Image (tube, grey):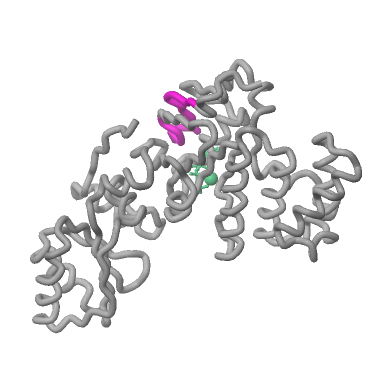
């Protein structure tokens, strides 16, 4: 039975050290019951390690946490009854078919034989797995496994569900299907803590977001708060000829007085803007210099830009090296006051 109904997760100063690697280095998290909480960070940030500690699968080296008021160290068996972790399910039985797995899982959750069959058929239909229902799990693709995994979590539907990168590597249609399912889980009473490397995913699903980088929470708040912390508007510029990128960045620095950023998509630049009116001046300057523009927009900052502003490096791996260099050269560093 949940002891605390207000907070699904309360963690203070969680630490996990592997050798001399402080994988999680003092993480605080508060997840309100009935919400989706997003933990956003690049590869190796410490997301999975944090979830494993909260799910009692890994012993913390420091700090403490409660799940619905139950201490993860002192009451692990109660905590385990209140949570579901995706990824567990796939290891049930590789030789059984999708249907057999779901039926087995339903039976383990106390459903009758008839109810188990009905529930399994319904879920397979909903997740577009009906055709593959008779195939053994070992022949499933990564995307099919994830869908089956999430389907299984709908059977037991524990009060708190940990989803570790539920949509990494999925095609866009399957992703939005997963998003719908996650929303449904919350609409029907579950609390979801999900990790993601996708900024738009956190933006779409999460009520609150913690941005985690190298084992540390570097920012926490709603998507809007995080975006506001970066600036009111963001300029997105795409050049007709990528060869002009550096010259365009110089023009931006000169006219707008801000450093711009190359996005992972080739030939695009973004820059923070305080006054959208200055865009006219910039366009005139670019024309003077003979730099043709293919696309230009002024929008709310993306979470990608938020990440960059908060950590001094992009959320994408490729740019991590550049970021390290920028940091060594005294790159941008930003303090965000705790939004709580
Ligand atoms: N069992 C382990 N033994 C040693 N080091 C580990 C172990 N698990 C994780 N690490 C290290 O801890 C750090 C954080 O890893 P973690 O898996 O938590 O990151 P993540 O944010 O989940 O990354 P990803 O997005 O790639 O899944 C990494 O440097 C990783 O190499
Ligand atoms: Mg991980």
Residue 138 x/y as whole percent: 78, 57
Q: Is residue 13 left or right of residue 164?
A: left
Residue 150 x/y as whole percent: 67, 48
**Residue under the point 81% across and 54% down:** 121
Residue 119 x/y as whole percent: 80, 48
Q: Is residue 31 left or right of residue 221?
A: right
**Residue under the point 31% across and 46% down:** 311
**In this view, which residue lies farthest toward the top?**
74
Q: Is residue 19 magenta?
A: yes
Q: Nearer the viewer, residue 138 or 289?
A: 289
- Quadrant the C terminus occupies: top left
Which stretch appears magenta?
10-25
Q: Is residue 61 above or below residue 248?
A: above
**In this view, which residue lies farthest toward the front?**
187
Q: Is residue 65 above or below residue 339?
A: above
Q: Is residue 181 above or below residue 26?
A: below
Dominant SS of magenta comes to strand
Q: Is residue 25 left or right of residue 135?
A: left
Q: Nearer the viewer, residue 43 or 133?
A: 133
Q: Is residue 27 above or below residue 235?
A: above
């Amino acid at each position: 039975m949940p002891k605390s109904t207000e907070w699904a997760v309360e963690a203070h100063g969680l630490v996990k050290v592997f050798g001399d690697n402080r994988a999680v280095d003092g993480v605080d998290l508060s997840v309100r019951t009935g919400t989706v909480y997003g933990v956003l960070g690049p590869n190796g940030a410490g997301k999975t390690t944090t979830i494993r500690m909260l799910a009692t699968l890994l012993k913390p080296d420091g700090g403490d946490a409660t799940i619905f008021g139950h201490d993860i160290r002192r009451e692990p068996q109660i905590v385990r009854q209140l949570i579901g972790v995706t990824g567990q399910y796939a290891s049930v039985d590789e030789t059984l078919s999708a249907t057999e797995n779901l039926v087995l899982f339903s039976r383990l959750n106390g459903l009758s034989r008839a109810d188990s069959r009905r529930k399994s058929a319904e879920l397979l239909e909903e997740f577009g797995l009906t055709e593959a229902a008779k195939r053994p799990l070992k022949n499933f693709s990564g995307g099919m496994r994830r869908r089956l995994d999430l389907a299984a979590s709908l059977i037991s539907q524990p009060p708190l569900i940990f989803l570790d990168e539920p949509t990494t590597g999925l095609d866009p249609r399957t992703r939005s299907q997963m998003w719908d399912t996650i929303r449904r889980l919350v609409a029907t009473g579950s609390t979801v803590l999900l990790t993601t490397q996708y900024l738009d995913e956190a933006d779409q699903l999460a009520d609150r977001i913690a941005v985690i980088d190298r084992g540390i929470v570097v920012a926490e708040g709603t998507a809007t708060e995080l975006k506001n912390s970066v600036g009111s508007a963001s300029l997105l510029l795409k050049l007709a000829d990528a060869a002009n990128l550096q010259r365009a960045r110089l023009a931006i620095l000169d006219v707008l007085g801000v450093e711009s950023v190359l996005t992972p998509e080739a030939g695009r630049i973004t820059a923070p803007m305080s006054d959208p009116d200055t865009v006219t001046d910039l366009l005139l300057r670019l024309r003077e210099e003979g730099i043709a523009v293919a696309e230009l927009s002024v929008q709310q900052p993306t979470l990608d830009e938020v990440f960059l502003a908060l950590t001094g490096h992009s959320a994408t791996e490729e740019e991590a090296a550049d970021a390290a260099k920028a940091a060594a050269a005294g790159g941008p560093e930003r303090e965000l006051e705790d939004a709580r």
